[in-house]
Image (cartoon, helix red, strand yellow):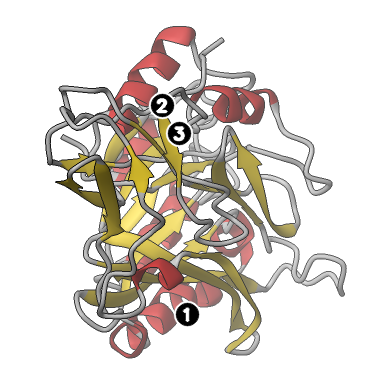
Amino acid sequence: MKPTGFFLKIAITGLILLIIPLTSALPSGTTTYSFVHISDTQNLATHYPDTYNLTFSYLESIKTEYNISAIIITGDLVNTWDKKSEWNVYSRARNLTNIPLYVTAGNHDTNRGKNYKYYSQYTGEQMGNYVTALNDFDFIGINYVDTSLSAQEFTALQQAIVNGSYNFTIIATHYYMGKDGTLSILGKDIDRQLIVQPTLILAGHVHWDLIRVKNISGYPVIEDLTNYQNGEPGGVKNKNYSAGTFYTVTVVDGQVAKIISETIHIFPEQSFEKKRVLYDITGQFSGSVPAPLPQVSLKPELPACELPCDPGEPVDQGFRLPEASKLLTSFKCAIIPGSCSGTKTLPATS
């Protein structure tokens, strides 16, 4: 069963139901770690193998200081899908770190999705899309496609998220949106069918650097386009350039509570900039004493229980909880008399 992100303690005194959010002091059960998103490193494979090496060796050198738990690469590891010399450059570079890699295929890696021979040989990943865990996230890897996935594939991926272990999803794919934020065909389908809880979407393909936050069906969605293949977007063109997006994650009692992004520059210099708080619900965990909400009159026959509360669409018979942040609009708990169960409303698939 999916762990719920919020619990209500229900106790009955006569005709009064007292609703008390269970909160704890933030330092208790809190962990912080980071991961890095890079994409479209193909020019390094073709022309600048030393910079490719530095990309991974530098991240290895700072992994302990920043508690880096993963490197996510959203495609185009090489320029030419069947050129062994480029794949060998990538292979040597990635072996300079022991940080776990999560990779999805780009169009350059697979002859536009038609041939996975060398991609699979040098990355260990197969042609199919995959679902796994990345720390406290359900992780979805979607390889490059010219248009979109089939309805059956989307159904399978959606069910994997719904039945997953965590309350936050990372979706990594190659082509999700353009530099103006316009979604690809695949991107539109991801938004329509895979947003069933808070989600971070990582992509590349288009030469640009863009992070934005939006709301889909009541869930916060962070979109990240990271592609430095020709240098700093909007700056001087320089193909010998390496940078990415650095994420710091705070987790409280197994629930993702805060996400911060920064641009991490690796070559020609090493630096961090553009720090942004993208998601923050730490306020709901602060304080060591539970704060009671206003009392609500209910029928006395409703038994006392622990009621899980998941984010979802507005439903009948619910309690609106205080807003956790500007990014999380509301939580809803649907109370079904006699069963003490909550319901989670998913967006309709189409």
Residue drawn at (40%, 79%), measured in percent from left and top? 59
**Cα–Cα gap, marks 2 and 3:** 13 Å
Check the image and report above or below for 341 versus 3.
above
Q: Which badge, 2 or 3, is on the more N-terminal residue?
A: 3
Q: What kind of element bears circle 2? A: loop
Q: What kind of element bears circle 3? A: loop
The type of residue carrying mark 3 is Gly
Is residue 202 in view?
no
The type of residue carrying mark 2 is Gln
Q: Which mark is residue 317?
A: 2
Q: Quadrant of residue 161?
A: top left
Residue 43 or residue 198, whichever sits in front:
198
Q: Which mark lies nearer to you, 3 or 1?
A: 3
Q: Which mark lies nearer to you, 1 or 2?
A: 2
Q: Which badge, 3 or 1, is on the more N-terminal residue?
A: 1
Check the image and report above or below for 269 versus 99.
below
Q: Residue 27's x, y, as percent?
A: 26, 84
Residue 300 or residue 346, whichever sits in front:
300
Q: Residue 40's x, y, as percent?
A: 60, 53
Is residue 86 in view?
yes
Q: Which residue is mark 1?
A: 54
Determine whether label 1 and label 2 are within 8 Å by CB.
Answer: no
Q: Which mark is residue 305?
A: none
Q: What crowding class fits label 3: few (fewer than 14 Cα within 10 Å), some (14-19), or many (20 or more)?
A: many
Q: Which badge, 1 or 2, is on the more N-terminal residue?
A: 1
Q: Which residue is mark 3?
A: 312
